[in-house]
Image: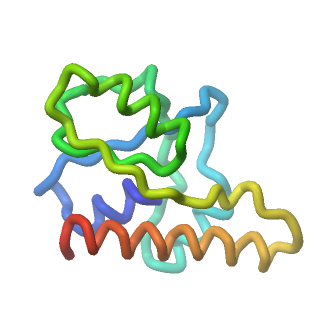
């Protein structure tokens, strides 16, 4: 979500990439696709990546959303002058219940990330 929103906000002015910590991700979560469509962003063709598939290490800023990702990013950037920030973010896939409860959790994460991006990087 964060990558797609940042790319929509900044286009090619800023190089943006995102990776996750899980190796088993093959497709974008359908709830992610739905809540991003609500704000006019199509992520249906996105292919999730992990740290092992990251081709670049020359980032000025790395933003992490989970404690595991934060520790991994700190480890990978320890020899670089890269700023690493942690934005504690709820994992919406952990929410159970009916469709509306789950959609609400994904919307909350989407809206939180949008606000954090705008606050940190400008509009």
Name the residue rendered at 60%, 27% in the picture.
Answer: 23
Look at 67% across and 61% down and name the residue there.
92
Q: Which residue is found at the position 68% from the left and 77% from the top?
A: 104
Q: Nearer the viewer, residue 104 or 48?
A: 104
Which residue appears farthest toward the left when viewing the image?
13
x then y, percent, for residue 29: 65, 53
User: Which quadrant of the figure has residue 44?
Assistant: bottom right
Q: Is residue 98 above or below residue 96?
A: below
* Nearer to me, 54 or 70: 70
> Residue 58: x and y, percent?
17, 30
Quadrant position of residue 76 = top left
Residue at image coords 21%, 20%:
79
Vertical placement of residue 101 versus 23, above or below? below
Residue 48 x, y percent position in the rendering? 51, 39
Q: Is residue 14 left or right of residue 113?
A: left
Number of marks in the rendered image? 0
Q: Position of residue 31 (x, y in %)?
A: 67, 64
Snapshot quadrant of residue 73: top left
Residue sitting nearer the eye, 123 or 47? 123
Q: Quadrant of the C terminus?
A: bottom left
Spot the residue most to the right.
97
Colouring method of the image: rainbow
User: Would residue 48 be found to the left or right of residue 53 on screen?
Assistant: right
């Amino acid at each position: 979500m964060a990558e797609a929103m940042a790319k929509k906000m900044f286009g090619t002015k800023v190089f943006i990439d995102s990776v996750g910590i899980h190796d088993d991700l093959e497709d974008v979560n359908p709830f992610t696709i739905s809540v991003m469509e609500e704000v006019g962003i199509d992520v249906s063709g996105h292919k999730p990546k992990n740290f092992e598939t990251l081709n670049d290490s020359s980032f000025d800023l790395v933003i992490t959303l989970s404690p595991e990702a934060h520790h991994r990013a700190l480890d990978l950037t320890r020899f670089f002058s890269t700023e690493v920030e942690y934005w504690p973010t709820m994992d919406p896939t952990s929410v159970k219940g009916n469709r509306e409860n789950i959609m609400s959790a994904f919307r909350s994460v989407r809206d939180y990330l949008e606000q954090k991006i705008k606050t940190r990087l400008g509009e």
